[in-house]
Image: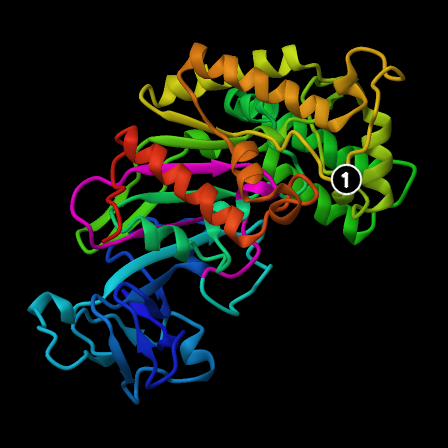
Amino acid sequence: MRRSGIRWLRDDGALCQPGEVIAYCNIGVIPTDDAPRPFAGETLDLQVAMATRLGGRLRRAQDASRGGFFDLLDHFLQWTPDYVIGTIEPPNGQPIADADGELRLMMTTGQRPSDIIDNRKGLASGSHHISRAWWSDAPGPMGVILAQGICDMLGVVKGDSMAFLELFGDAPGSAHVIYVDDGPVVPSARQLLEEIRRTPEERAVIAHDLMQSLATGAITPTPADWIFAGVVLNNLQRSPLTRRFDVLSRHGLAQSRTVDAVLLTVNSEPAYISRHKRLGYSLHCHNFRLAQAGPAFQRWYVDTFEIKSYPIESVAADYRALIGAIREHAPTAQILVLNAMSTMGAEDLHTYAAYDAPMGAALETVRNKDLNLMLADLATELDLVVIDADAIASELGGQRSIPDGLHQNGPMQSELRAEVLRVLRARGVTGLAAAN
């Protein structure tokens, strides 16, 4: 193992709390034989975050940080487990056990859409379509929790730090948490189901068709077209729900187990679904992302896909099929779904008489109520757990906590995170010891 110099998150002389992450570095795991290098597609962003076991005043070792590229790249220094990065001066009279001198190590890494998209500005930073973290020092099996959604999921899982620090501060066990970024493609139940079922041959046909269509279309593709098409294909040609990942701990290198819990959000379900006219696959992109694509991709999308309404009955059917497909790979997987905010503080409708049935096709809050009712029915039928974001937002003050019905403030994210952890612990998910 190799490492970079230490990059500090706390100043010299700062008062640190027990369990606080104070520093991190990049590391590299190099095979000693001809075996493939582990963490394929993730080696550029493999990092170790270091947390103290006791509180006190931090004194940083003078040679821990080397500066420049020595602190950015992982191949300058040898990893030695007994290397001292600094000291903690505890409050007077506090007893110190031998184990208190060993830092807790939290691993983080991520997979970029392309290795040329380089960003080394901080802990767990960068443009990752899959990012993950785990404590590396807890004995026993690691529970695997995978979260896949849109904006309402990001802060709940990755926190304000965007580095999982809040989540792992509350879950000091041996959980392995994976966050899948939505990018341009909305991960609806139908989208995720098709990704699980798609064969390698079908993926190759989709990729060839998209690239050929752009290259031979009436509009000359711009760099924005090719970049957008590449990111879309990254979404269409993966299925993180069924994938195993490399994990490194003090006990060695291993492969993760199948998922123990999956966290989804009903806000990923659009009112309309886009289906390829000839190949039949679904592709629903965020509208604001489509506006960022180049003109050739936009024309291809308009000409190639038919857009149809996505009624609640179809969403429910897709959830049934998706959960069945997940449990084919992981029979005991717990499924948690965030529900939708069903009211808006600025809503001022006095009568619904002007709207034809189903009113959810025209009114977002009515559709959200329908989606929440659908989830309540599925919870009993399929043994899934509804995380009641609607009720939590109402208790905290909806206009204050989630004013646009989707994007949350910090307290709202914290409450949702606590509720998710409470449910996972109650359901017996491995590796989720409660914080001291």
Magenta region includes residue 175: no
Q: Is residue 2 left or right of residue 68?
A: left
Please, which residue is most extreme toward the bottom here? 62
Q: Is residue 137 left or right of residue 108?
A: left
Whether residue 390 appears in this view of the structure is yes
Q: Dot 1: what SS?
A: loop
Q: Residue at x 51, y 47 (%)?
A: 413
In the image shown, does 306 or 360 lie closer to the viewer? 360
Magenta region includes residue 128: yes
Q: 10 Å neighbourhood of mark 1: few (<14), some, or many (≥20)?
A: few
Please state which amino acid type lies under the numbered disc 1: Ala
Measuring from the top left, give residue 195's x and y in whole percent: 55, 26
User: Coloring scheme of the render?
Assistant: rainbow
Measuring from the top left, give residue 279's x and y in whole percent: 71, 19
In the image shown, does 281 or 393 lie closer to the viewer? 393
Measuring from the top left, give residue 412's x and y in whole percent: 53, 47
Q: Is residue 42 left or right of residue 150?
A: left
Picture quadrant where residue 93 is located: bottom left
Task: Give the magenta range.
Answer: 124-153
In the image shown, does 30 or 128 lie closer to the viewer? 128
Q: How many labels, in total?
A: 1
Q: Residue at x 62, y 33 (%)?
A: 341
Image quarter (top left, top right, bottom left or bottom right) of the C terminus: bottom left
Please, which residue is most extreme toward the right here? 218
Whether residue 35 appears in this view of the structure is no
Q: Residue at x 57, y 11 (%)?
A: 317
Question: Disc 1 designates what residue?
Answer: 346
Q: Residue at x 27, y 64 (%)?
A: 1
Q: Is residue 279 left or right of residue 264?
A: right
From what the image shows, is residue 152 above or below residue 52? above
